[in-house]
Amino acid sequence: MKLIPENLVVLEMANNHMGDVRHGLDIIQRFGEVCRAFGQFRFAFKLQYRDLDSFIHPDAQGRDDIKYVKRFSETRLSRADFDRLVAEMRANGFLAMATPFDEPSVDVIEDQGLDIIKIASCSFTDWPLLERVVRCQQPIIASTAGARVEDMDRVVSFLMHRDKEFAILHCVGEYPTSEQDMHLSQIDFLKQRYPGVRIGLSSHEDPGNTDIIKLAVAKGANLFEKHVGLPTAAYPLNNYSVSPEQMFAWLTEATRALRMCGAADARPPVNPREAASLRSLRRGVFARRPIAAGTVVKPDDTYFAFPPAEGQYTANDWSKYAVYTAAVDIQANAPIAPDNTTREDRRAKIWEIAQRVKSMLEEARIIVPGSADLEISHHYGLDEFERTGLVLITVVNRGYCKKLLVSLPGQTHPEQYHHIKEETFHVLRGEVNMLLDGQPRVLKAGDVQTVEPGVRHSFVSPTGSIIEEISTTHDPKDSFYVDDRINQNKDRKTLLTYWMV
């Protein structure tokens, strides 16, 4: 089970509790009221942990002239205070998170049993801290502000090699971040560079901006982090944290963006109105001439014309993988339809053959160029392919030719010959029982056999085999089968180009 939910919004309190636990509880409660209205998201509240007595250098303790020392010291909370805040998060339906800035803080996170650990951008390559964090059971979310590509590569590799569930956030460490500095296309960059890794956005834009979240959703982010606070007379809000009202507006626009973008992992169901409209604009399949019952309908027997009749087959249904057979006599110009024709779709069988061949190549550790065409020879028809047939992969065909011949276990390649082509077979895998002008020859992996023009040759592979064929240029008109039924079968080959996916 994934521990980082889809469409997770992390509400970052940071030091906006202002060292006042009551104010922190009010923040959680007010944002809980807002978030409960948006059930399509999961929400987490996040704190920041520092063991200030050891985190701050002894010489800097109490220094009001150092900005962050002053800020951290003035907003200090006790462990009991943090426990109260965590309990309130859970009471309001939030996951509980924290960002540790030192190793003792990780101990606190483990002791509290928080749900997720956050790594701040400033700690992204803090290797002592990372080594401590990966010993925890919690998943990790890490921000990448200021990180170089090589830094990100190292951290992603570090986490992956330790089998951690983790996500990384595009982040810009400017508070607030101007629109021109958001660089939202980094979401695309991260998704392309680290496929399979959750990519999200931690943003610090003007709190009134609701455009950036829509763009981030459109780019495929489904993990977000926002700084939040509750403005009061005593505690005014900073210029990059959102109020409850601004959070409501932000989530409203995020919801709109999710609805408009829809699912990214699959095609949505076809809209019936859309389908009906498009079908009415297609060309129907009609009989060019009378077709007798029981006859396989060939391309020359048909033509395509507009408008289509209700329920008939259209040009969009016509495919090299589909075989149509007249169930009754069909008159010229009549529509070809399910009520007068049966349809057999052989796409699944063709794809299954291609996948078996791909598996055999992978097991043999044979790498094939992605652009290589795959040719399925089903000499007596696809139904007989398991018994008689061959798969040929053309790697190059110029003044010389290289192919890979893949034979399934027990499959026979029928007797043929060439007038011009000379070919040499190099068995890469399996055993091949070959007949050369009727003379048997057993070839095993590593064996080489040359077949000169005019020599009849056939073979069967009891184990399944992969043969490298090196030959002079292949000409499809220079292959002759001893069984003339194969020569007369014009539909004995199926070609695939995009089969390596």
Image: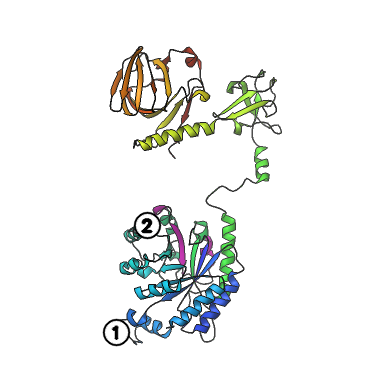
Q: Position of residue 124 (x, y in %)?
A: 36, 66
Which amino acid type is marked by label 2?
Answer: Met
The residue lying at 43 percent from left, 75 percent from top is 48
Q: Residues within 10 Å of mark 1 (few under 14, many from 20)?
A: few
Q: Is residue 347 above or below residue 417?
A: below
Q: Position of residue 78 (x, y in %)?
A: 43, 83
Q: Is residue 320 above or below residue 136?
A: above
Q: Is residue 207 magenta?
A: yes
Which amino acid type is marked by label 1?
Answer: Pro
- Residue at the spot of label 2: 160
Q: Quadrant of residue 55 in the image?
A: bottom left
Q: How is the image coloured?
A: rainbow
- Residue at the spot of label 1: 58
Residue 439 seen from this side: yes
Q: Position of residue 27 (x, y in %)?
A: 54, 78
1 vs 2, front mark: 2
Q: Position of residue 480 (x, y in %)?
A: 42, 14
